[in-house]
Amino acid sequence: MPTKTLAVKFPLEINEETGSFTVYSMSELTDVVEQNIRMVLLTNEGERIFNSDFGAGLQRYLFLSETEVLRGIPGDDRYPPIKNHIINHLQVYVPYITVENLEVAAGDSLLKVSFKYFVNGSSASSEFELTVSDII
């Protein structure tokens, strides 16, 4: 019986045995979830074709002060408080997870985001950590 696949792995690569793209299987559920979380957090709004609201665009927060990152910039809708911004985007684009203990550290052109998540309706859970810097 063939293995059930969940998603294509990024960056794209060809599986030499099958001749198709390399994919994630059900046993790699948290890997798929983390790939999806990274895509949401690192994609800039307006960057995804046919869905201009997709993406949290965390890189744009890099050069703000720690206070501006954590509290947002009053009167500027482009810079809401980062924790709210992350949670809102994950609820819309990765609605099958529950996020707990979201922490954000900012400073010196660096953002560090970490949290624990649970995959709703399963026993899968994991710790997620992402560091965003001005050097890609």
Image: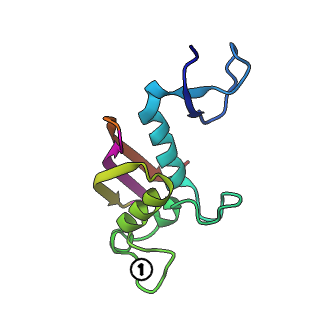
Say left or right for 56 vs 130.
right
> Is 113 one of the magenta-colored residues?
yes
Q: Is residue 78 above or below residue 86?
A: below
For image coordinates 47% across by 66% down, the residue present is 61
Q: Position of residue 14 (x, y in %)?
A: 70, 24
What's under tag 1, amino acid-wise?
Answer: Ile
Q: Position of residue 48 (x, y in %)?
A: 66, 57
Say left or right for 49 vs 107.
right
Q: In this picture, which residue range is highlighted in magenta?
A: 108-121
* Quarter of the rendering containing residue 68: bottom left
Say left or right for 98 vs 44.
left
For image coordinates 31% across by 49% down, the residue present is 115
- State the residue lying farthest toward the bottom: 75
Few, some or many C-alpha atoms within 10 Å of disc 1 (few <14, some 14-19, many ≥20)?
some
Q: Main secondary structure of the magenta part?
A: strand
Residue 109 seen: no
For image coordinates 36% across by 61% down, the residue present is 107
For image coordinates 42% across by 61% down, the residue present is 86
> Is 91 one of the magenta-colored residues?
no
* Quarter of the rendering containing residue 18: top right
* Quarter of the rendering containing residue 104: bottom left
Q: Which residue is mark 1?
A: 73
Secondary structure of residue under mark 1:
loop
Viewer-proximal residue, 133 or 32?
A: 32
Q: Is residue 45 above or below residue 29?
A: below
Q: Position of residue 59 (x, y in %)?
A: 51, 60
- State the residue lying farthest toward the right: 19
